[in-house]
Image (spheres, helix red, strand yellow):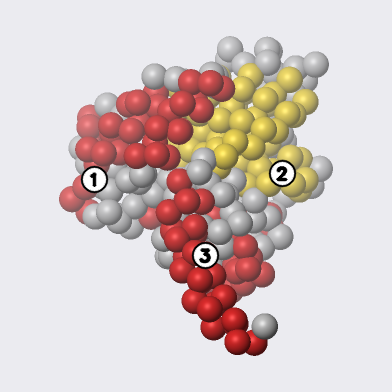
């Protein structure tokens, strides 16, 4: 067996690298989460996504649009890091326009959204004229609340906590009679304070660890990641909290054991 060890290593590592570079990152998964929501007026389907870090590969973008058409969401939520350092504003507008054909889009900013190329920044009002920002086929919530009366849902969009643009007091105005959703990029600050009348927390940023054997080191590499909540459905102070592993990649262009995903949250009134 020892004499074959170099050959095994020679074959395994290139195969693992190719899989992590070209196969898994281009395989979009759907995580389905049903939740009871007696406060809403009628059943509602939310699609949560984060960390797209566009531009997406052609395969992922095609799969994303196909899945949105199949799920038929009532609301699309984007929990930050839609753009990347390589993205142009034109490509961001185009993808949002395609996605808006399936549903309303509400989004918050993430750290790479705020650190992208200054001349092409999609989000920053001080870099883009406000009228151009208003033309986006999506609603960007920058420490703002949006009430959706048709569902009795209140969205609390907290600006990026990683770059210290958040407003921790935003959720204090949540009314107990409404179904209150907090949408934010990273939950690492939120899980250190009371969540009050929130009924659902949606976030991303962690990439689920991105490579399975690096999960225990997630908080070491990024202080804004709480490795207790890397990806999935959790209960925090008795409230459901969803952390998505996202779609794109950060730091390394690899994914292994943590497939890109979107989350279909099906809220049931009864």
Residue 250 pos. (x, y %): 44, 59
Residue 223 pos. (x, y %): 56, 68
How would you rate the neighbour count of disc 1 (Cα within 10 Å): few for under 14, some for 14-19, many for 20 or more? Answer: some
How would you rate the neighbour count of disc 3 (Cα within 10 Å): few for under 14, some for 14-19, many for 20 or more? Answer: few
Task: Identify the residue shown where x is 23% and y is 30%.
Answer: 131
Q: Which residue is mark 1?
A: 88
Task: Identify the residue shown where x is 30% and y is 38%.
Answer: 92
Mark 1–mark 2 contact, CB under 8 Å? no
Task: Tell me which numbered mark, 3 or 2, is placed earlier along the sequence.
Answer: 3
Residue with the most extreme left position: 119
Task: Tell me which numbered mark, 1 or 2, is placed earlier along the sequence.
Answer: 1
Local secondary structure at mark 2? strand
Q: Which residue is mark 2?
A: 233
Disc 1 versus disc 2: distance between alpha carbons?
33 Å
Q: Is residue 139 left or right of residue 55?
A: right
Task: Identify the residue shown where x is 49% and y is 59%.
Answer: 20
On the question of residue 173 being in view, the answer is: no
Q: Which residue is mark 3?
A: 16
- Where residue 182 sits, quadrant-wise, is top right
Q: Dividing the image into 4 quarters, which one contains the C terminus?
A: top right
């Amino acid at each position: 067996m020892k004499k074959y060890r170099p050959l095994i290593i020679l074959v395994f590592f290139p195969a693992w690298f190719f899989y992590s570079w070209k196969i898994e990152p281009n395989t979009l998964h759907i995580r389905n989460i049903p939740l009871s929501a007696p406060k809403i007026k009628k059943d509602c389907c939310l699609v949560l996504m984060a960390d797209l870090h566009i531009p997406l590969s052609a395969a992922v973008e095609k799969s994303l649009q196909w899945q949105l058409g199949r799920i038929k969401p009532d609301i699309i939520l984007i929990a930050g890091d839609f753009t990347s350092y390589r993205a142009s504003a034109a490509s961001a507008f185009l993808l949002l326009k395609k996605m808006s054909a399936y549903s309303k889009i509400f989004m918050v900013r993430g750290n790479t959204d705020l650190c992208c190329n200054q001349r092409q920044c999609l989000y920053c009002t001080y870099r883009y004229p406000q009228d151009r920002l208003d033309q986006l086929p999506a609603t960007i919530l920058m420490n703002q609340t949006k009430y959706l009366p048709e569902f009795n849902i209140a969205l609390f969009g907290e600006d990026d906590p990683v770059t210290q643009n958040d407003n921790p007091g935003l959720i204090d105005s949540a009314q107990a009679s409404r179904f209150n959703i907090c949408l934010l990029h990273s939950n690492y600050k939120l899980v250190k304070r009371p969540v009050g009348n929130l009924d659902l927390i949606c976030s991303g940023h962690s990439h689920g660890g991105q490579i399975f054997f690096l999960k225990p080191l997630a908080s070491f590499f990024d202080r804004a990641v709480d490795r207790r909540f890397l990806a999935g459905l959790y209960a925090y102070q008795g409230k459901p909290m969803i952390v998505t592993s996202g779609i794109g990649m950060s730091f390394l262009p690899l994914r292994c054991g943590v497939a890109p995903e979107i989350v279909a949250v099906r809220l049931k009134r009864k």
